[in-house]
Amino acid sequence: KLQEELQRLRSEREKELTQVREELEEKEAQHRAKIQAEIDEKLQEWRDQYEADQRAKIQSQVGEDLAATADEAAKTDLEARQAAKAKEFEAQLAELEAKVAADLEAARAKKQKDLKEQIKVLEAEQETEMVKKITDVERGFQKQITEEKKRLEEEFKATKAKLQSDHDEAVA
């Protein structure tokens, strides 16, 4: 009977441990998805803002250059100058796009590294939490087992005393 009770308690403990693990895994998956979504959103915001700022800067610079050379362009071949400026603008734009791509890659790598750090911290916290829950569950089971053992021992002693008393009466 004690073995059956121990087996039942072990089975309950395994069910609780499985439930705790599943809850922790679900929380971790949700946290990872949330962090990745935030990273993607921030990267897109940075990319859009950076491109807008750089284009505005280049357009402003090109506009200033064109205004400064307007007098000179009127004296020389206007079409040749415009073609040169267009090529220069295209080169600057290509350079900007390469720089934006490099900056975004660096930002993505840094954010990815930060995400991995956060995940490690979360995993450590979850592992600590899981160990604490497991320890609490084990303590509870140990207490139940001890109480059940005491109860059974008392019941055994009472039964033994009754049988001894019945035996003594029968002998007398």
Image (tube, rainbow, N blue to C red):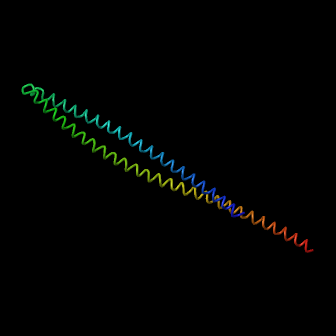
Quarter of the image with the N terminus in it:
bottom right
Which residue lies at the image location 56% right of the left edge and 56% below the top edge? Answer: 132
Residue nearer the viewer, 80 or 5 = 5
Left or right, 148 with reference to 135 = right
Residue 93: x and y in percent read: 22, 37
Q: Position of residue 86 (x, y in %)?
A: 16, 32
Location of residue 9 (image quadrant): bottom right
Residue found farthest to the right: 172
- Residue at image x 52%, y 56%? 128
Q: Residue 64, how many percent across, how many down?
A: 18, 30
Q: Is residue 150 left or right of residue 73?
A: right
At x 6%, y 26%, the residue is 75
Residue 103: percent from the left, percent from the top?
29, 44
Residue at the left extreme of this rendering: 75
**As drawn, which residue projects farthest toward the bottom?**
171
Q: Is residue 21 left or right of residue 7?
A: left
Residue at (25, 42) in percent of width and height? 99
User: Quick one: quadrant of the C terminus?
Assistant: bottom right
How many dots with numbers?
0
Q: Is residue 169 above or below residue 45?
A: below
Residue 47 location, quadrant:
top left
